[in-house]
Amino acid sequence: MSDRIPMTRNGYDKIRAELDRLDNEEMPKIVERIATARAEGDLSENAEYHGARESQGLLQAKINILKDKLARASIVDTSALPKDEVAFGATVVVRDLDFGDEETFILVGAGEEDYDAGKINVTSPLAQGLVGKKVGEKAAIEVPAGTNNFEVLAIRYEEF
């Protein structure tokens, strides 16, 4: 996977901080647990040792995923993007044409997603269906549950 991952500087810094915490705080704790369990003797029946090794593997996998995200990060300068259409960093107010209710989405990069707060990844199918739309335009977006039909009501850009 060599696809670039768009993100803001804040998103990049958030992932970097999480990676540092895992590498410098969590991993040493697990290494210490392994050493303590190993000192107890017979490893074949040592549940603490096997549990710590499994935790180490899971943590290393998470660290690898974060390192990959950072390696493929593309910091986006939102000030250079068009302000009259939906793009990375936009806050988009849409009307669901099937149900009549309004929804607000903020198109963010990796590490900044918060679906409860309406922050969706710009690479998600929903966000990609809105990218490039202007106020008044409609979007039919294919999602696993069917098709969502939206009308763009407003587009705002705020600093991250």
Image (tube, rainbow, N blue to C red):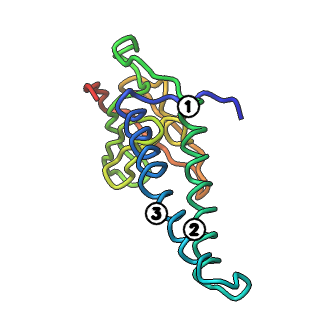
Q: Quadrant of residue 61?
A: bottom right
Q: Which of pointers 1 and 3 lies earlier in the amino acid sequence? A: 1
Q: Position of residue 109 (x, y in %)?
A: 45, 35
Write down the residue under mark 2.
55
Q: Secondary structure at mark 1?
A: strand
Write down the residue under mark 1.
5
Marks 2 and 3: in contact by CB < 8 Å? no
What amino acid type should be assigned to the residue bearing mark 2?
A: Ser
Marks 3 and 1: in contact by CB < 8 Å? no
Residue visible at 65% across and 85% down in the picture: 46
Q: Which of pointers 2 and 1 lies earlier in the amino acid sequence? A: 1
Report the number of numbered marks: 3
Q: Which of pointers 3 and 2 lies earlier in the amino acid sequence? A: 3
Q: Position of residue 58 (x, y in %)?
A: 60, 62
Query: 82 or 22, which is in the foreground?
Result: 22
What amino acid type should be assigned to the residue bearing mark 1?
A: Ile
